[in-house]
Amino acid sequence: VPKREATRGYGAEVMAFDRFAENGDAVAERYARAHGMVRLSPFDHPHIMAGQGTVALELIEQAGPLDLLLVPVGGGGLLSGCATVARALNPDCRIVGVEPAAANDGQQSFRAGRIIEIAPPSTLADGAQTRHLGHYTFPVIKALADDIVTVEDAALVEAMKFFAQRMKLVVEPTGCLAAAAAFSGAVELKGQRVGVVLTGGNIDLARFASLVA
Amino acid sequence: VPKREATRGYGAEVMAFDRFAENGDAVAERYARAHGMVRLSPFDHPHIMAGQGTVALELIEQAGPLDLLLVPVGGGGLLSGCATVARALNPDCRIVGVEPAAANDGQQSFRAGRIIEIAPPSTLADGAQTRHLGHYTFPVIKALADDIVTVEDAALVEAMKFFAQRMKLVVEPTGCLAAAAAFSGAVELKGQRVGVVLTGGNIDLARFASLVA
């Protein structure tokens, strides 16, 4: 709801669809064709990937060299962009994507070496409910990332509480993926300089309140 | 509770007292004397006032000249410090303190021209539950501030919701005083460059959740 309102607030037309009955990509493609528009994927486009990679660029510029970089994974735009930057600036940096355990299509794909599509998943991390990595993002992730790990939804809630209580930040569940991996021991951190990417606070306030209460 | 835990976490000894039955200043003074310590007021000391004034210093350095500066008021340390800085850097800037309506001892004192002490007030803004301005802070506020206005607790909750939803920040009720004055029309803002001081996010998460839900 807040994402929808904010998007409308920026002047966009918002169309609803049932993600369990229809494919969002197909809906958008159909609409774009019917109206002479160009469809732009939220992740699967080189410019989008490059833009999202500036997160790692700014992080490394400000924080210095990293031994490990943890990045949330949905369609892989952020991970592919950040991996490109981190690999270029810090060749020895370990680059690890983090997915919700219930939506681990990226992990499956990374380990199988080909894009694996899953049924619409259910997880608190609604920004990572994508069903498969992109045709542009996957090859980059396959070439540059070191691993993709997963965290349970409960660990996302713990991370949300930490950020609200100790850092005074509202972070949505998807935005907590990388931090939850760090906090929950899903990756080894000891003695390393670790970069953790937090992404987004688009969560309904009542929902946020019920999760952290 | 989070303030108490955080304070203990920094190595302090924390003593509890009933603020409706005892005077906190007297409790602290007694303890300090018994243990050969120096009591430092959280607001009523020139060094504390000067330190809190760096808020306005950084704000004006970063944001440029202001027409109006809104500052939360408890004991007046922040307001006196910020007023000193703002008056020096922007002589024409209007400087307005903001108190909870239920704890308007500062407004009463400012208007009467002398320190007025009130009974222990009840307001969501627990950081502004002070019963009177300080002997150091009051003369500075009297000389340099333009007014002290008040806001109702309901306006603090609305401001908390705004910061959580749109700026992804957890701000405690006291920290929202100045913003609530801006949002609720307690002061005229039109056409002005307005500085709003937000202070603190020390609020129990369950309490925060129940207020913004």
Image (cartoon, coloured by chain):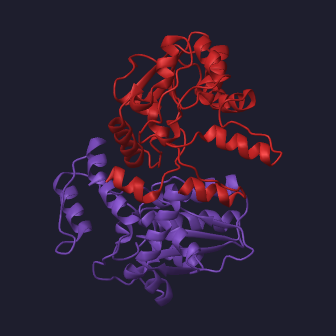
Chain colours: A purple, B red
**Which residue is located at x 51 percent, y 23 percent?**
B106
**Which residue is located at x 57 percent, y 77 percent?**
A143
Drawn side of residue B136 relative to residue B177, left or right = right
Drawn side of residue A171 relative to residue B61, left or right = left
For this orientation, the residue located farthest to the right is: B36
Q: Quadrant of the C terminus of chain A?
A: bottom left
Query: With respect to residue B70, does B201 lie above or below?
Result: below
Drawn side of residue A141 relative to residue B59, left or right = left
Drawn side of residue A103 relative to residue B143, left or right = left
Query: Is any part of residue B166 visible from this angle?
Result: yes
Query: Is any part of residue B193 visible from this angle?
Result: no
Whole-percent x, y for residue A18 in the image:
17, 68
Whole-percent x, y for residue B84 in the image:
66, 19
**Which residue is located at x 42 percent, y 62 percent?**
A45
Whole-percent x, y for residue B203 in the image:
49, 51
Along the line of sight, the residue nearer the viewer: B183 or B105: B105
Whole-percent x, y for residue A112 in the image:
47, 90
Along the line of sight, the residue nearer the viewer: A8 or B203: B203
Q: Quadrant of the N terminus of chain A?
A: bottom left
Residue B122: which quarter of the image?
top left
Count of all numbered marks drawn on residues in the image: 0
Residue B133: which quarter of the image?
top right
For this orientation, the residue located farthest to the bottom is: A112
